[in-house]
Amino acid sequence: MELFDSHAHYDDEKFNEDRDYIIEEVYKSGVTKFVSAGYSLESSKKGIEISNKYDYVYTTCGISPNDIPDGKDKITQELIQIEKLAKENAKVLAIGEIGLDYYWNKDNKDLQKYVFLEQIKIANKLNLPIMIHTRDAIMDTIEIIKNTEFVKPGIFHCCPLNKELIQAGLNKDFYISFAGPVTFKNSKNAKEIVSMVPLEKILIETDSPYLSPEPNRGKRNDSRNVLFIAKKIAEFKNITVEEIAKITYENAKHVFNIK
Ligand code: NI
């Protein structure tokens, strides 16, 4: 059985001591493809470095709502850099993570929307999907998804378990990526939410090194734990974990356009 972790962060300092070792262990465990996602200009550059070292590691470039630099000029410069990195590096599979986050930043909503929309334009221009981060910003995210054209179907990364948001995504042909929270005992609507997403639209991810799924909640996360997400989704969908592994692997290859 092979698994595809659609979203992790191997540039994170939590992997500074053992990054290469963990990446190799992940691969040996059967997670034979994974994405180390960028969230700032700096991490996008690191993601490219890491992905160039391993055939089976991919990356994304983008500026998250929590990593917007100060000043209009700086923002413009960074957006130009993101576009250039994404254009010139074959291992960059998407523009992300990008989006809205009113949990950490409530005072710059218009700026967040601007940076989000500018990066959607970059993705459309480069014929890439977007990878969305959204937190405490459901209504504004839905509004943008509804009113924007996408050249490629996007991905809701670590998708909040919210029906309206998921429906808005599915209406635009988006993929829904489930992470650790579907395994949490307090995620009471997880089964209902997973049930509303057709198998061909489901991705699985760890968001490592954060958000470890049960039974490893609280420990440092790595892509080996994507197995627990797969098991949970299989249980909800009443099919085998092998089937979920295969379907989500194919879905990831499809959305990311990997041959
Ligand atoms: Ni992430």
Image: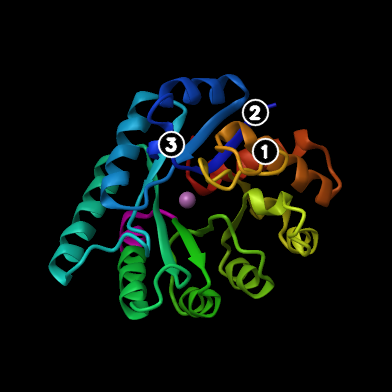
Q: Position of residue 187 (x, y in %)?
A: 73, 60
Q: Earlier in the sequence, mark 2 or mark 1?
A: 2
Which residue corresponds to the image point at 27% horizontal and 41% vertical from the top-left? Answer: 45
Please tell me whether mark 2 sits on a helix, a strand or a loop: loop
Q: Position of residue 97 (x, y in %)?
A: 42, 55
Of residues 88 and 6, which is closer to you in this image?
Answer: 6
Of residues 20 and 217, which is closer to you in this image?
Answer: 217
Q: Earlier in the sequence, mark 1 or mark 3?
A: 3
Q: Is residue 30 left or right of residue 79?
A: right
Q: Which residues are magenta?
A: 122-129
Q: How dense is the environment of label 3, judged by Cα within 10 Å: few (below 14), some, or many (20 and up)?
A: some
Q: Is residue 202 above or below residue 227?
A: below
Q: Is residue 96 left or right of residue 201?
A: left
Point out which mark residue 2 bears. Answer: 2
Residue sticking out furthest to the right = 238
Give the residue type that dot 3 points to. Lys
Which residue corresponds to the image point at 72% horizontal and 52% vertical from the top-left? Answer: 184
Of residues 223 and 32, which is closer to you in this image?
Answer: 223
Q: Position of residue 214 (x, y in %)?
A: 71, 43
Which residue corresponds to the image point at 31% horizontal and 52% vertical from the top-left? Answer: 40
Residue 162 magenta-highlighted: no
In the rendered image, which residue does mark 3 sit on? 14
Residue sticking out furthest to the front = 218
Mark 3 sits near ligand 1, with its Cβ under 8 Å away: no
Disc 2 vs disc 1: Cβ atoms closer than 8 Å?
no
